[in-house]
Image: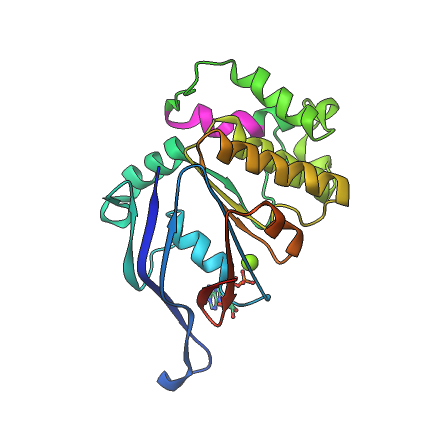
C-alpha cells in the first residue's frame, strides 16, 4: 500500500500570543512506497513523531491530506479510520506502550483480535508471533505479564506486535531505543525484511544506524524533511 502525504501541517501555540504559533510540521510532502524503507532522522523536537502520527491516522493535520492507496484517511469517520488502521497498519509507538496486565502473547495478538482482523497469509498468528519473539531472543517471554518487562523487552514486544499481522504499512517510532547493538541490528533487519516482503516501512530514529537500512533517507529540519 502506498501512503502519500501532501502539504501536511501541524501547528501548536506556545504561550498566549497568536505570534507564538509554531509549526511542528510545515507543509510537508512525503510518500511511502511498498517494498521500501524510509528512514526519517533528525534532532529531538524536529517534528518526526508528529509526521508519523499524521501519516498513520493518529493525528488529524491542520492542513493537507494523507492518501492511502488514493483513499483520504481523514475523510473517514473515527470508527472506519480505526478499522482501516487496524487492518492495514502496524505501529511501534515511541513509548513502547503495552497493556501491563496482559501477557506478552496476548499483547501481540490483540490487534488481530480487535475488529476480527484477518490474518492475511492464512498462517497461524500465535506461531508467527512466537517466531518473531524468538528472532529477537525473547521467545521465553510469551507467557510473562508485559508489566514485568524491561524497557528493551517491551520495545521488542511492540516490534513483534507490529509485524505479526503482516501489515501493508509499518510505522516504527524510535524502534531501537533501549536496545543493545545486537538487538538494534536484528530489529532493523526485521523491518527491512518486512519491506522486502512488500510492506511500506517508515522508521523514525535519531540513531544514525537506521540509515544503513534505508532505501529513502530524510532528515527533519524545523518541521520539514529534507533528503540526505
Ligand atoms: N500535543 C502537543 N502540544 C504542543 N506541542 C507539541 C505537541 N506535540 C508535539 N509538540 C511539539 O512539536 C515539536 C515536534 O515534536 P515531535 O514531533 O514529538 O518531535 P520529535 O519526534 O522529532 O522529537 C516539539 O517542539 C514538541 O514540543
Ligand atoms: Mg519523537
On the question of residue 80 being in view, the answer is yes
Front residue (pair 141, 187): 187
Front residue (pair 121, 144): 121
Instruction: Name the spot of residue 110 as percent of width and height, x first.
Output: 50, 28
Ligand 2 found in image quarter: bottom right
Occupied quadrant, residue 44? bottom right
Q: Residue at x 27, y 49 (%)?
A: 74
Query: Is 57 situated left or right of 219 in this image?
Result: left
Q: Which residues are magenta?
A: 107-115
220 in relation to 19, above or below: above
Instruction: Name the spot of residue 28 as percent of width and height, x first.
Output: 36, 63
Main SS class of the magenta portion in the image: helix
Q: Residue at x 44, y 35 (%)?
A: 199
16 in relation to 95, above or below: below
Front residue (pair 31, 53): 31
Q: Quadrant of the N terminus?
A: top left
Occupied quadrant, residue 144? top right
Query: Is 87 situated left or right of 197 in this image?
Result: left
Instruction: Name the spot of residue 87 as percent of width and height, x first.
Output: 37, 31
The coloring applied to the image is rainbow
Occupied quadrant, residue 63? bottom left
| Residue 198 lies in the magenta stretch | no
Number of marks drawn: 0
Q: Residue at x 60, y 52 (%)?
A: 211
Instruction: Name the spot of residue 98 as percent of width and height, x first.
Output: 59, 38
Query: Is 38 situated left or right of 17 in this image?
Result: right
On the question of residue 180 being in view, the answer is no
Amino acid at each position: 500500500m502506498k501512503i502519500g502525504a501532501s502539504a501536511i501541517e501541524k501547528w501548536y501555540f506556545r504561550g498566549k500570543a497568536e505570534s507564538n504559533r509554531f509549526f511542528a510540521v510545515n507543509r510537508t510532502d512525503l510518500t511511502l512506497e511498498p517494498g521500501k524503507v524510509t528512514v526519517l532522522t533528525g534532532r529531538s523536537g524536529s517534528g518526526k513523531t508528529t509526521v508519523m502520527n499524521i501519516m498513520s491516522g493518529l493525528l488529524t493535520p491542520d492542513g493537507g491530506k494523507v492518501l492511502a492507496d488514493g483513499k483520504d484517511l481523514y475523510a473517514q469517520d473515527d470508527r472506519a479510520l480505526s478499522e482501516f488502521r487496524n487492518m492495514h497498519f502496524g505501529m511501534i509507538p515511541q513509548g513502547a506502550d503495552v497493556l501491563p496486565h496482559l501477557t506478552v502473547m496476548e499483547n501481540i495478538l490483540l490487534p488481530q483480535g480487535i475488529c476480527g482482523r484477518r490474518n492475511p497469509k492464512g498462517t497461524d498468528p500465535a506461531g508467527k508471533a512466537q517466531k518473531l519473539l524468538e528472532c529477537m531472543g525473547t521467545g521465553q517471554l510469551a507467557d510473562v505479564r508485559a508489566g514485568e518487562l524491561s524497557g528493551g523487552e517491551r520495545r521488542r514486544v511492540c516490534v513483534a506486535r507490529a509485524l505479526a499481522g503482516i501489515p501493508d504499512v509499518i510505522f516504527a517510532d524510535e524502534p531501537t531505543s533501549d536496545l543493545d547493538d545486537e538487538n538494534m541490528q536484528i530489529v532493523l533487519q526485521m523491518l527491512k525484511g518486512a519491506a522486502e516482503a512488500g510492506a511500506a516501512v517508515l522508521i523514525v530514529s535519531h540513531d544514525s544506524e537506521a540509515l544503513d537500512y534505508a532505501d529513502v533517507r530524510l532528515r527533519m529540519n524545523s518541521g520539514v524533511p529534507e533528503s540526505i
